[in-house]
Structures are given as C-alpha cells and as structure tokens.
C-alpha cells in the first residue's frame, strides 16, 4: 500500500511542478535535446570518416609498377618471381597496353582522340596483404629500380 501511495505522490508532484516551472523544464528538455543532437552528429561523422579511411587503406595496399617498353613476357614473369621472392604479395596482375588503352578510352569516353599517338605503358598491379610493412614495400620498389627492369 505504501508503494502505491509513493507512486501517486510522485506523479502528483511531477504534474504540479510542470505547471509552476514550465520555462525551466522546457529549457532543460531543450538543452538535453541539443546535446543529444551534437553527440549524434559527431558519432555519425566519426563513422563516416572511419569508412573513408578504411577504403583508402585498401587503395594504399596496391602499387602500380610500370614495365619498360617492349619487355618480353619472360622478363615480366621474372619480375613477378622476383617480387614474390622479395615480398609476400596477395596478387600480381599484368596489364598490357591493349587493356590499358581500353581502360583509358572508357574513362575518356568522348575524347578518345587524345589517346591516338600516345604510347600507353604496360604495368603490373601488385596487391599486398594487410599485414605488409610499408618499409618492406619501399625496399621492394628500390630493389626493382636498381635492376633497371621498371620505370
């Protein structure tokens, strides 16, 4: 019975206080609403920036290595073997000049005449594991440049 009385007393006091202190209660609700809005804004912004950073990390896991012009397939295969022996890679894809030209013509759609007369290079796309150290990637690039097999 006492609990029922306490609940009744609490509700009665709450309603009577709302009547007398309308401005204070409205100001309190408004303040809490603004704080919740700002907090929500920062949480959404943080989540969005986090997805952007993660997508950029995936892009940074790839490097493009341009092969010297008129390289033979044997040279390209040797470069691939050297890359794998130096550093563990997830994938190595060779893009010849025809595929590269098609890719650029898709990008330039209406301005494909810009590609005429341009020698589009062949290249390798090297994708690294997420655990690959950046220093090891730099060392790989330096070793390939020293061998004069890439540009």
Image: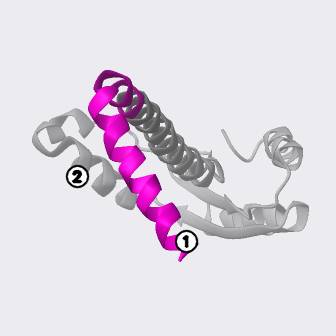
Q: Residue at x 82, y 45 (%)?
A: 134
Q: Nearer the viewer, residue 13 or 100?
A: 13
Q: Quadrant of residue 11?
A: bottom left
Q: Residue at x 31, y 22 (%)?
A: 23
Chief SS of the magenta region:
helix
Above or below for 114 versus 81: above
- Find disc 2 in the rendering and name its residue: 106
Q: Which residues are magenta?
A: 1-29
Q: Quadrant of residue 111?
A: top left
Picture mark count: 2
- Find disc 1 in the rendering and name its residue: 3
Specify which label sits upstream in the sequence, 1 or 2. 1
Q: Residue at x 47, y 39 (%)?
A: 45
For this view, does 115 lie left or right of residue 130?
left
Q: Is residue 5 magenta?
A: yes
Please tell me whether mark 2 sits on a helix, a strand or a loop: helix
């Amino acid at each position: 019975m006492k609990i029922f009385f306490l609940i009744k007393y609490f509700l009665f006091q709450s309603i009577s206080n709302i009547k007398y202190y309308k401005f204070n209660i409205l100001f309190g609700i408004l303040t809490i609403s603004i704080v919740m809005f700002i907090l929500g804004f920062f949480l959404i912004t943080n989540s969005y920036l986090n997805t952007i950073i993660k997508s950029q990390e995936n892009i940074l896991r790839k490097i493009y290595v341009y092969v010297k012009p008129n390289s033979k397939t044997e040279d390209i295969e040797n470069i691939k073997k050297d890359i794998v022996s130096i550093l563990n890679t997830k994938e190595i894809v060779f893009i010849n000049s025809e595929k590269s030209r098609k890719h650029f013509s898709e990008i330039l759609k209406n301005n494909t005449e810009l590609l005429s007369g341009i020698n589009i290079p062949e290249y390798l796309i090297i994708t690294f594991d997420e655990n690959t150290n950046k220093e090891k990637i730099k060392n790989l690039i330096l070793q390939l440049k020293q061998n004069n097999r890439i540009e």
